[in-house]
Image (cartoon, rainbow, N blue to C red):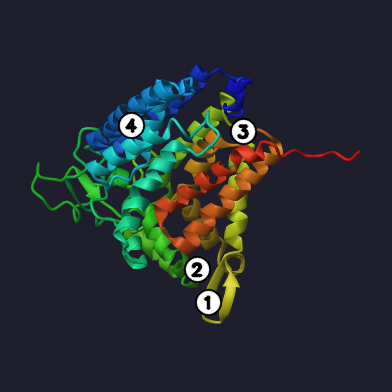
Amino acid sequence: MATVSYAPPWLGLLHTRRQIDVAGLIVAVAMLASSVIFFGHVALTQVLLCVVAAISAYLPVMLLMWMFHKRPHTDSVMHAITMAMMLGLLIPINSYGWEHVFAGTLLGIFMPFVGRAHRIRMHPAVLALIATWALPLMISNVNEQGLTHELTNDSNVAVLRPDRVVFGNVRHAKEQRSYQPWWLTGENPYMDTEPQGTASDAIARPFPHNTFIRDQKRLLRFPRILANMMASGELPRVEELLLGCVPGMVGATSQGLIILLGLYLMYKRLSWWSIPVIILLTSLLTLMAMPVMLPHGKTTVFWVLVDTHPAFSITYLGYFFLTSPMLLVAFILAPATCPLTSLGRLVYCIIIGMLMVLIQWFVQIPVLTLLSVLVAGVVSRMLDNLHFRPGR
């Protein structure tokens, strides 16, 4: 009985721990394959650094816990490797090696105390990711503008050219000045002016989430800017967001892959269709209520989108959801720490959906969008006791 009390909702009900670990590893490997295609060996090295650092910290902590508290191992090494891979895949491509090691070490320390089989049901990979950026900045006591600048810095952000995928060096990049999509890069004679054989391996492009989060309110006031940003290549095409050939978290740039992996988890009964539906619907309703200051006064996003051309409204909503980690949270991260009861899952998903939009709208720091998963995870175990009470 004691073991069941520390388990996630579905353990002992549908699957064994090993089956869950195997499914999680398949998801992580698929995301890793996508990252290697568009970011090459840099993405692979990033993930390996996180795995080595995490396991190096995790095993000694688990040994100490067994020596002094004689507690049974509630997580497997396979689960620790999966979480470490997920952490490496969540780190942006413009990060540095010390960040990978630091984040992996924190993950190894956190895993024996938080996660799927513990009383605190916070996602350990997300917790390590947030701590990697938040703690050093709080210690350095930077001001708000400096904080925002450092967390939204677009330096060294690139993606491999279509003819250099997998084997190219993403650090060897030049700026893209073509309105053409990624798969046609290199066919524009006005873009590649170097002699034959000297073209760069990668294309430096803006981080789409940073770009959109910076201009999300201005676009509502001046809708024409959105078309200009798309035409100039400052914002990628929707097809590029679905494919994943854009900078960002190395394993989560392909929104199409994220959806497919979410459906796979549902097929394996490790997730429920209601989780992404409720989270995305709540996010949409929350976005509609966000205040916007127009020349004639204050209004809400809902009325701005209603009064503008439908093409702009659809495009704006598409970029709002596809450039942010919302699909990643809804399909991959949120199911790992959700409550057992149906009503508890409803409240859990509403919390995540609202917080993601509020953070993106008011705080405007991309990485902190994932903070919604941690906040909801804190109350997840309490929501297990939330039931519908039929009338007598």
* Residues at marks 3 and 2, CA–CA distance in whole angstroms: 34 Å
Question: How packed is label 3: few (under 14 Cα within 10 Å), some, or many (20 or more)?
Answer: some
Residue that mark 4 sits on: 54
Disc on the earlier residue, 2 or 4: 4
Label 2: state its secondary structure: helix
Query: Mark 4 and mark 1 in contact (Cβ < 8 Å)?
Result: no
- Foreground residue, 238 or 376? 376
Residue that mark 1 sits on: 294
* Camera-nearest label, 3 or 1: 3
Disc on the earlier residue, 3 or 4: 4
Residue that mark 2 sits on: 220
- Using the image, tell me which numbered label, if any, was put on residue 272: 3
* Residues at marks 3 and 4, CA–CA distance in whole angstroms: 29 Å
Query: Mark 1 and mark 3 in contact (Cβ < 8 Å)?
Result: no
Residue 327 lies left or right of residue 365; in this view the side is: right
Residue 336 place in picture, x, y as percent: 53, 34
Disc on the earlier residue, 3 or 2: 2
* Residues at marks 1 and 4, CA–CA distance in whole angstroms: 48 Å
Residue 160 lies left or right of residue 192; in this view the side is: right
Label 1: state its secondary structure: strand
Name the amino acid type tagged 2.
Leu
